[in-house]
Amino acid sequence: MSELTQDRIPEPGRISAVESADGVTRDAPPAAPKGKRPQHTGILLVVLGAVFMALLDATVVNVATPTMRTDLDTTGSALQLIVSGYTISYAALLITGARLGARHGFRTVFLTGLATFTLASLACGLAPSAGVLIAARVVQGLGAGLMVPQIYSLIQLTFEGPARARALSLYATVIAVAVVVGQVAGGLLVSADLFGTGWRPAFLINVPVGLALLVAAVRLLPVGTPRSAKGLDLPGLVTLTAALLLLVIPLVLGHEQHWPLWTTLCLAAAAPMFGVFVLVERGVARRGGAPLVPGRVLRSPDLVCGAAALFFGMAGYAGFLFSFSQHLQSGLGESATRAGLAFAPLALGVATGSLTWQKLPARWHLPMIASASALAAAGYLGIGYTLRAGGQGGLVLPALQLLWGLGLGYTTSPLLTLALSRIDPADASDASGVLTTVPQLAQVVGVAAYGSVFLALADRPGTAGAAAPSAVASAQALYATALPVAAGTLLGALAVLPLLRKRR
């Protein structure tokens, strides 16, 4: 694997425009204000704290959904929308959020997104109904979509050389760990039932954290003067959002409504709408505009293959995590705390893989990613098979979760680094938007598709066995869900094989 680009990047401050060798005007790295050196450690802590909070919130809700279902008297489809509503708006806005940062200043857009996210978290925590909660989650996702794309750009423009490589590695590690820690934290917060608030602290905890990050960001993040002339590509944003909704909404609602005609029509229209999106993007490029997904960025094989592998891996992770959480609480009757703590081995595995993969020789990285994807697939199958009769799994279950976590840790963090390894700093904002969008889209599709498989099968009556019928039905649904999840994860391993052959 090639090293991260190490062109000298001046300190953050004023952003100017430069003309590259191909005649295209692009953003130049900003220069530091005279006599004032940014506090790099503080900047890194602020941006990593923000991404940790945003991604934690994307998963902390998984453990809280069974409690929400009882408290709000809602349906499984509404629970999927509570989970996916955040991710849909988050994913749809990421590339546009990166573009807004390049046009109006990374600091300004970061602060706007952080403030929106914090206020929406308060609205989520106070929501009186499932409908209000879904709407607040959508707004919360919009805040994250403005905030998160600025993080990669700020890292690129703040650090240089080995320091940048270390910062990006920490960024990837935070992403990998946050999505798992959210499960444990969610369980603890829900079971604590602070002042009788049940699931609400899972969102309200973001309010003091967000306010603290806002104060620190105002003090530490550099003030820039951006001069980017890139357009926002609103036609691309509209067609991409429409394509996502045509795909996700029927997958989420179809099984509970017994697949009415409108769900079939929407799914049939999704593929053509993605085709329309491609045509719209080509038209924007021909007119000299700035498409959401620039062809220049997508000509990097590392980015394309890495993003494909990330998509399959994160779709399986999100879908199985949602299903497993439902099984532990609704099927086995575990408390939110025990369900959250049950994911501790998974968190340990993810953290271990994310923090140790760089110690392996560079020539092992691509084979390691492919092997780790297979390891994660084995974890899914093992968990499903072990729990298929409705039992607790004993000591085998933590071992299989650790296996799953190691597979995830040895793929997610290195894939992020691989995909960004040959990106020019001038393309930082576009690459940031593309790369952060793919895993979020994957989670939307994973929860909608795999989660629907689980919910549809778990509603069937159970059979006689070692546990209550509902537990057996839920366990068999989890096992059935593990099969396509494992198959999709193995497709992620195949996605990196072209790069492996190219290296050889």
Image (spheres, grey):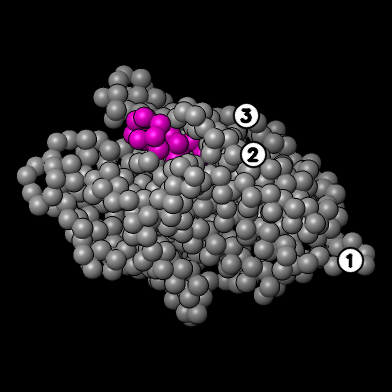
Q: Which residue is mark 2?
A: 119
Q: Which residue is mark 3?
A: 235
Q: Is residue 7 visible?
A: no
Is residue 387 on the magenta stretch? no
Residue 83 % position (x, y): 44, 40
Neighbor class of circle 2 (other Cα within 10 Å; few <14, some 14-19, many 20+) is some
**Picture residue at 28% right of the left edge, 69% below the top:** 399
**Picture residue at 29% right of the left edge, 51% below the top:** 334
**Which of labels 1 and 3 is toward the front?**
1
Q: 479 or 324, which lies in front?
A: 324
Residue 431 % position (x, y): 62, 52
Residue type at mark 2? Answer: Leu
Secondary structure state at the residue bearing disc 3: helix
**Which of labels 2 and 1 is toward the front?**
2
Q: Which residue is mark 1?
A: 36
Q: Quadrant of the C terminus?
A: bottom left
Q: Is residue 81 left or right of residue 173?
A: left
Comes first in the chain, label 1 or label 3: 1
Residue span colored magenta: 68-86
Neighbor class of circle 3 (other Cα within 10 Å; few <14, some 14-19, many 20+) is some
Q: CA distance from mark 2 to mark 3?
A: 29 Å
Q: Are marks 2 and 3 in contact (CB under 8 Å)?
A: no
**Picture residue at 82% right of the left edge, 48% below the top:** 226
Q: CA distance from mark 2 to mark 1?
A: 32 Å
